């Protein structure tokens, strides 16, 4: 087996960075779940909060994207 | 590193090569005045916006035809959003926010055309937009309220002992705003396109080619959704920052 250890470190780091996306997925699911449970109790008030729903999804998804970006950078742009 | 990969045999693909900026006319170095593919696609985005909003509504029919009604829908959607979030005083800044939204949404959708170039996937583009938002919102806040703008960081609903700590935390999170604002858009667009290209590379293997095709279709659908949602989120966060500047209260 050959190759340099810097490259191996970069690939292992890329794999480790992907674990961050699990947290983002849990966060997004939690936000949407809370929105759904509120919307099913009070459907008429749900429409006014769709803007906040999308803002919340984008905020929590952003951190998943940050970790995916780190993984991509480590894989292809050492 | 990427050059080493070319000496391997087997599956070799470079999903990040679609994001490289190249000069349009085959020269070497890129100066600030060089026409690149980035310039071309930004010009196409501006042209599309011009055709949609200016030429489409030029007839000013009372009963709109299709293009005029799309332009009016976009205008009304953003106008309502600015009015709802930033209040009556924020409507003065509606042209700036409409420009941001139309540019981001059209640039994102143009990047979805096969063999095109996504301009908003570059940090250089989104950082300029986010920094301009940050600087202009801060200047607006200081212009309107003078030194009272710093009340934004002084949380008056917290006990007195905590307020200095909270002020430092609020200050740090205020300065992190342009960072997250820019990276969110660039990262989402870049990640979507890179994943599509990774799935496309697997289509070279005959055994899993149908699966790879399904993957490409699914990721493309998500990219369409992301293109609109990220433009919407960039714009609505700009409106929220504007509201914070116009009415700094806690």
Image (cartoon, coloured by chain):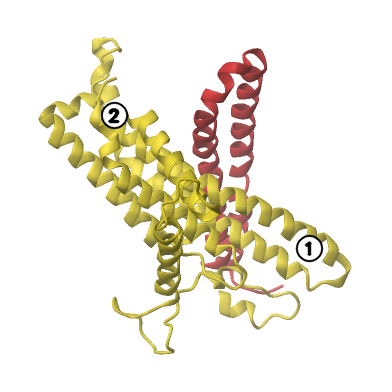
Q: Nearer the viewer, residue B231 or B31?
A: B231
Colour of chain B in the rendered structure image: yellow
Q: What is the CA distance from the residue labelled 1 to the residue labelled 2?
A: 49 Å
As displayed, is residue B25 above or below residue A22? Answer: below
Q: Quadrant of the C terminus of chain B?
A: top left
What chain does badge 2 belong to?
B
Tint applied to chain A in the drawing: red
Secondary structure beneath dot 1 equals helix
Q: Extreme top residue here?
A: B159
User: Which residue in the protein does label 1 denote?
Assistant: B213
Crowd class of label 2 (few under 14; some 14 to 19; many from 20; radius 10 Å): few
Q: In which quarter of the image is residue B92?
A: top left
Question: Residue at 41% across / 78% down in the picture?
Answer: B36
For label 1, the crowd category at 10 Å Cα-Cα, with few meaning under 14, some 14 to 19 and many 20 or more, is: some
* Residue occupied by mark 2: B88
List x then y, in percent, for residue B167: 25, 25
């Amino acid at each position: 087996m050959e190759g340099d250890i810097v490259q191996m470190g970069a690939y292992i780091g890329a794999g480790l960075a992907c674990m961050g996306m699990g947290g983002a997925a849990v966060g997004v699911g939690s936000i949407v779940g809370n929105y759904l449970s509120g919307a099913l109790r009070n459907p008429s008030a749900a429409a006014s909060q769709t803007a906040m729903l999308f803002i919340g999804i984008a905020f929590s998804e952003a951190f998943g994207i940050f970790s995916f970006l780190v993984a991509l950078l480590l894989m292809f742009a050492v | 590193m990427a050059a080493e990969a070319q000496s391997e045999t087997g599956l070799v693909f470079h999903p990040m090569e679609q994001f490289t900026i190249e000069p349009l006319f085959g020269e070497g170095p890129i100066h600030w005045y060089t026409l690149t593919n980035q310039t071309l696609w930004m010009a196409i985005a501006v042209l599309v916006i011009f055709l949609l909003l200016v030429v489409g509504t030029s007839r000013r029919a009372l009963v709109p035809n299709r293009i005029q009604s799309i332009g009016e829908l976009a205008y009304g959607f953003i106008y309502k959003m600015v009015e709802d979030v930033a209040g009556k005083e924020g409507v003065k800044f509606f042209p700036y926010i409409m420009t941001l939204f139309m540019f981001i949404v059209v640039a994102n959708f143009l990047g979805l055309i096969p063999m095109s170039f996504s301009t908003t996937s570059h940090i250089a583009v989104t950082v300029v937009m986010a920094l301009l938002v940050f600087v202009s919102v801060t200047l607006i806040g200081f212009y309107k309220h003078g030194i009272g703008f710093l009340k934004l960081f002084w949380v008056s609903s917290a006990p007195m002992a905590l307020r200095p700590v909270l002020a430092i935390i609020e200050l740090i999170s205020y300065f992190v705003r342009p960072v997250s604002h820019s990276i969110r858009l660039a990262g989402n667009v870049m990640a979507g396109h890179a994943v599509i290209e990774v799935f496309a590379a697997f289509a070279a293997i005959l055994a899993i080619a149908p699966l790879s095709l399904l993957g490409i279709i699914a990721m493309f659908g998500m990219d369409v959704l992301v293109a609109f949602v990220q433009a919407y989120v960039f714009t609505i966060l700009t409106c929220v920052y504007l509201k914070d500047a116009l009415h700094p209260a806690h």
